[in-house]
Amino acid sequence: MQISQIRWSKNSGWEQSPANLNAAELVMVFADDGHFQTDACFKELRDRFPKAHVVGCSSSGSVGGGGNK
Protein backbone atom coordinates (compact mmCIF):
# COMPACT_ATOMS: atom_id res chain seq x y z
CA MET A 1 0.00 0.00 0.00
CA GLN A 2 1.23 3.47 -0.87
CA ILE A 3 0.06 6.54 1.01
CA SER A 4 0.45 10.12 -0.18
CA GLN A 5 -0.88 13.44 1.03
CA ILE A 6 -1.58 16.54 -1.02
CA ARG A 7 -2.98 19.83 0.19
CA TRP A 8 -5.26 22.51 -1.17
CA SER A 9 -5.32 26.19 -0.22
CA LYS A 10 -7.45 29.14 -1.28
CA ASN A 11 -4.36 31.01 -2.44
CA SER A 12 -2.57 28.34 -4.46
CA GLY A 13 -5.07 25.55 -5.14
CA TRP A 14 -3.82 21.97 -5.20
CA GLU A 15 -0.22 21.05 -4.56
CA GLN A 16 1.42 19.19 -7.40
CA SER A 17 0.71 15.52 -6.86
CA PRO A 18 3.14 12.72 -7.75
CA ALA A 19 2.40 11.17 -11.15
CA ASN A 20 1.58 7.77 -9.67
CA LEU A 21 -1.46 9.13 -7.81
CA ASN A 22 -3.63 9.05 -10.95
CA ALA A 23 -3.94 5.29 -10.34
CA ALA A 24 -5.16 5.78 -6.76
CA GLU A 25 -8.04 3.54 -5.73
CA LEU A 26 -9.14 5.50 -2.64
CA VAL A 27 -9.04 9.23 -1.91
CA MET A 28 -10.00 10.50 1.54
CA VAL A 29 -10.77 14.21 1.80
CA PHE A 30 -10.81 16.05 5.15
CA ALA A 31 -11.89 19.68 4.88
CA ASP A 32 -14.11 22.40 6.26
CA ASP A 33 -13.69 25.01 3.51
CA GLY A 34 -16.81 25.77 1.47
CA HIS A 35 -14.93 24.89 -1.75
CA PHE A 36 -15.17 21.22 -0.79
CA GLN A 37 -18.95 21.38 -0.89
CA THR A 38 -19.06 22.40 -4.56
CA ASP A 39 -19.51 20.38 -7.73
CA ALA A 40 -16.37 22.04 -9.10
CA CYS A 41 -14.26 20.58 -6.30
CA PHE A 42 -15.63 17.09 -6.87
CA LYS A 43 -14.88 17.45 -10.60
CA GLU A 44 -11.29 18.49 -9.78
CA LEU A 45 -10.90 15.39 -7.61
CA ARG A 46 -12.44 13.10 -10.27
CA ASP A 47 -10.15 14.57 -12.94
CA ARG A 48 -7.09 14.18 -10.71
CA PHE A 49 -8.00 10.68 -9.47
CA PRO A 50 -10.12 9.09 -12.22
CA LYS A 51 -10.00 5.52 -10.84
CA ALA A 52 -10.54 6.31 -7.17
CA HIS A 53 -13.45 6.09 -4.81
CA VAL A 54 -13.64 9.56 -3.27
CA VAL A 55 -14.89 9.88 0.31
CA GLY A 56 -14.79 12.87 2.57
CA CYS A 57 -15.90 14.59 5.72
CA SER A 58 -15.33 17.81 7.59
CA SER A 59 -12.09 18.26 9.48
CA SER A 60 -11.85 17.15 13.10
CA GLY A 61 -11.72 20.78 14.26
CA SER A 62 -15.06 21.45 12.59
CA VAL A 63 -16.63 18.37 14.19
CA GLY A 64 -15.25 19.35 17.58
CA GLY A 65 -16.52 22.91 17.29
CA GLY A 66 -13.09 24.39 16.60
CA GLY A 67 -13.48 25.10 12.87
CA ASN A 68 -12.57 28.34 11.13
CA LYS A 69 -13.82 31.32 13.11
Image: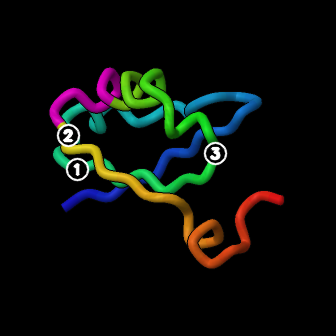
State which tag comes first along the sequence, 2 or 1: 1
Label annotation for residue 33: 3
Is 10 rendered above or below residue 40? below
Read off the magenta span: 46-51
Q: Residues within 10 Å of mark 3 (few under 14, many from 20)?
A: some
User: In terms of sequence position, does the residue under pointer 1 or pointer 3 come before the other?
Assistant: 1
The amino acid type of the residue labelled 2 equals: Ala
In front: mark 1 or mark 3?
3
- The residue lying furthest to the right in this view is 69
Based on the picture, tell me whether residue 27 belongs to the magenta stretch: no
Query: Is 51 located above or below residue 2 in the figure?
Result: above
Which mark is in front, 2 or 3?
3
Residue farthest toward the bottom in the current orientation of the protein: 64
Work out how far the residue at label 1 is from the one at label 3, CA to CA, in angstroms: 21 Å
Is the C terminus in the top left, top right, bottom left or bottom right quadrant? bottom right
Q: Residues within 10 Å of mark 2 (few under 14, many from 20)?
A: some
Q: Residue at x 73, y 72 (%)?
A: 66
Residue position marked by numbered label 2 in the rendering: 52
Residue at 32% x, 21% y is 47
> Where residue 12 appears, x then y in whole percent?
70, 28
User: At numbered mark 1, what does the secondary structure look like: helix, strand or loop?
Assistant: strand
Query: Residue 26 bears which disc, if any?
Result: 1
In this picture, residue 64 sits left or right of residue 10: left
Amino acid at circle 3: Asp
Q: In the rendered image of this protein, does residue 61 appear above or below residue 41? A: below
Q: Secondary structure at mark 3?
A: loop
Instruction: Give SS at disc 2.
Output: loop
Which quarter shows the N terminus?
A: bottom left
**Looking at the rendering, which quadrant does residue 51 occupy?**
top left
